Amino acid sequence: MTSHAPAGNARADQQLRELLEAAPDAIMQVDQAGSILLVNRAAESMFGYSRQDLLGQPIEILIPHEYREPHAGHRGKYRAHPSTRAMGSGLELSGLRRDGSRFPVEISLSPSHTDQGLRVTAIIRDMTERKRAEDKLRKLQEAYIRDLTSSNHELALRNREIEQANRLKSEFLASMSHELRTPLHTIIGFSELLGEELEGPLNERQKRFVSHIHKDSIHLLELINDILDLSKIESGRLELRPEVFDLKAVVEESLAAFQTLSQAKSIALEANVAVAQPVEADRLRFKQILINLLSNALKFTPEGGRVDVECAVRESFAVVSVRDTGIGIAKEAQQAVFDKFYQVGATTKGIREGTGLGLAITKRLVEEHGGRITLESEPGKGSRFTFTIPLNAIKKRGSSK
């Protein structure tokens, strides 16, 4: 058995040398004085020295000049307290090639005690490619952050411009609405006087002309009023005037305004108000919400149909529903009906009517009171608009801000 031991040791030494030479990282071993005892092929390639040039030399020849003296002190401390140091320990280290060029490295250290004293094995990894990739990634990140910052700045400027444009638009609409309403009231007033024939009789053709003038002037006034309301809401200049009122009385007043129209279309118009306590809200705006919904229901309900108003109290909210047996609204259009200028389709007369602002204004007025509005509908089976308003809407709205 002993005769095979030298051959076995030689084979093990050969395998160890092959392993060292095949390693992709530089491997060196130094003694306790810092002299290089062992070098593999990767170390020669990495530092640009031959093996003969390195063996016996101090390890400091592979370190940049300004770090050589401190490194000798570090070696002394390490010799007093040797320990394994894993690669990637967070230290910024540099190697020095024979041609004087520097490159970033990571180093792991492994101490071992032999008969000849302390030996330290160092595995050195060239970090040039990784650092290059990290630098490229960092530059890309910095460029991305710069672009994002610039884009955010541009977006903020654009948003401010849009806000200013919206504010100017609202102010312009409000101003123009006031300017237009004055001559319109004059046109409406004189057309009514002409229709009364106080200054003399009109022939049938003249009566028709005056009727068209009056009807279209009223329609234009409604459009201007809607635009004025919307501009006030969007510019934040709408002021709610709270008062305590009887909900049932307001519902009856609203229904009375549509009695002639409902009778002309043979539409049953009824209300069921199960609210005994008074409501504190803007009475005028509450009535406007209800009238908008009733107008919409009657417009899209065919002759012989039905429109019902139901009012109840749920917790601290007044819940009002306007239900009709009209043409209904497709599911995909139900959210859009609350958009400005949106018209769901032809009325029961086969034409489009109105400004497309009524439901948009209604929704905003409900929300200004601290409530919400919903829609349930199915084509051919009618629609139900339900809105909620806190019984003390103004107080709740003020406390939520």
Image (tube, rainbow, N blue to C red):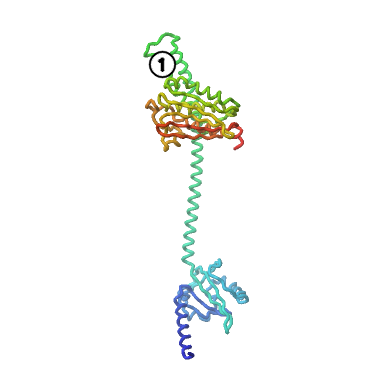
Q: Secondary structure at mark 1?
A: helix
Q: Is residue 189 visible?
A: yes
* Res. 66 image quadrant: bottom right
Q: Nearer the viewer, residue 273 or 187?
A: 273
**Residue 190 on image: x %, y %:** 46, 15
The image position of residue 122, as x and y in percent, is: 53, 75
Q: Is residue 230 visible?
A: no
Q: Residue at x 44, y 76 (%)?
A: 22
Task: Kindly identify the residue that appears in the image at 47 percent across and 18 percent down.
Answer: 186
Position in image of residue 184 (x %, y %): 47, 21
Q: Nearer the viewer, residue 222 or 381?
A: 381
Q: Nearer the viewer, residue 212 or 311?
A: 311
Instruction: Give left or right: position of 147 versus 77.
Output: left
| Callout 1 amino acid | Val
Residue with the mark numbered 1? 210
Q: Nearer the viewer, residue 249 or 371?
A: 249
**Residue 252: x, y in percent?**
53, 23
Give the farthest residue toward the top: 200
Question: Is residue 322 shown above or below 133?
Answer: above
| 209 in relation to 115, above or below | above
**Left or right relative to 275: residue 322:** left
